[in-house]
Image: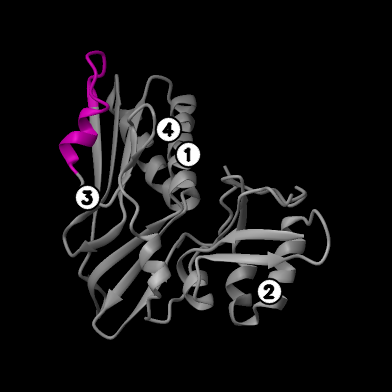
Amino acid sequence: MKLTIQLFAGIAERLGTSQLEYEYPGTDPTPVQLKENLGVAYPEAAALIRVSFLAVNQQYAPADILIKAQDEIALIPPVSGGDGTDSSDHEHRSSYPEHRTDDGLFLITQSPLSVEATTGLVITANHGAALTFVGTTREMTGEQRTVYLEYEAYVPMALSQMARIGSEISERWPGVRCAISHRIGKVDVAEISVVIAVSSPHRNDCYDASRYAIERLKQTVPIWKKEIWEDGSEWKGHQLGPWNPMDN
């Protein structure tokens, strides 16, 4: 059974490719079975494969789903270590143009982000409160100096997960409006990597929804950052403890 599997971040670097053409020795594996076989076939990446989740057709795959040959499959790593060398294939994966959801609220782009533009998407006549979170590249983390960050995304799934965050916010805080813009590619020190804007009739919901949005983004949206230091580099993903993007 021939499967095409998309790879990202540290796994793509470790295997030197962003796409595997893999011959599975059987039919219709579960995610657990496929990961076990991949770990044996690619022992140099087995540790990363083991802690990754499988996405099937741009959705995180439950353990009991059966994978078909025609499915779109991706390995989604959490925190994964890079070796400081970029393959040309990885460079190509970071060259997406601008992508936006149909409603205009959720954006992934290589261009500099505008706080005003993202905030403007949530301002309405009937909302008396708006709050904008801006994430920028920090130079110093303890004694470690970051030269710049490089972001990579599984773009279509990232957009759908961002839109899902907006839907979850609407369900938890009826009437709250949310917009998220995220940059990919190279982001220099003090430049903006993410803008999250929310608005609501009253301010308390704004504070709660804004915190919820950034935590869910870190948990479920397949976007990775590579920290480039003066003496090396490392991929960073989810950093909030044991990673399960299917937890609500």
In the image, which disc is placed on residue 39?
2
Residue that protrudes farthest toward the right in the picture: 26
Quadrant of residue 179 within the rendered picture? top left
Residue at left offset 38%, top offset 72%: 88
The amino acid beneath tag 1 is Ser
In the picture of the structure, the residue carrying the numbered disc 3 is: 111
Query: Residue 205's spot in the image, x, y percent?
Result: 35, 28
Which label is found at residue 160?
Answer: 1
The quarter of the picture where residue 206 lies is: top left
Quarter in which the N terminus is drawn: bottom right
Report, in whole angstroms, how far the alpha carbon at label 2 lies from the one at label 1.
Answer: 28 Å
Quarter of the picture holding the C terminus = top right
Measure the C-alpha gap from mark 2 to mark 4: 35 Å
| Visible residue check, residue 128 | yes
Is residue 126 found inside the magenta-colored segment of the image? Answer: yes
Q: For marks 4 and 1, give the one nearer the viewer.
A: 1
- Can you tell which mark lies on residue 81? none
Q: Earlier in the sequence, mark 2 or mark 1?
A: 2
Left or right, residue 144 beside residue 10? left
- Residue 225 shows in the view: no
- List the residue tagged with mark 4: 166
| Marks 2 and 3, the one that precedes in the sequence | 2
Q: Where residue 54 sits in the image (x, y, percent)?
A: 63, 56
Which amino acid lies under the numbered mark 4 shown in the image of this protein? Gly
| Crowd rating for badge 1 (residues with CA inside 10 Å; few <14, some 14–19, many 20+) | some
Q: Amino acid at mark 3?
A: Ser
Can you give x and y, in whole percent of width and height, for residue 242 in the image?
A: 56, 61
Q: Nearer the viewer, residue 149 or 1?
A: 1
Give the magenta-colored segment's residue range: 114-129
Give the CA distance from mark 4 to mark 1: 10 Å
Query: How far apart, in angstroms, are the residues tagged by discs 2 and 3?
Result: 37 Å
Tell me the CA gap for discs 4 and 3: 22 Å
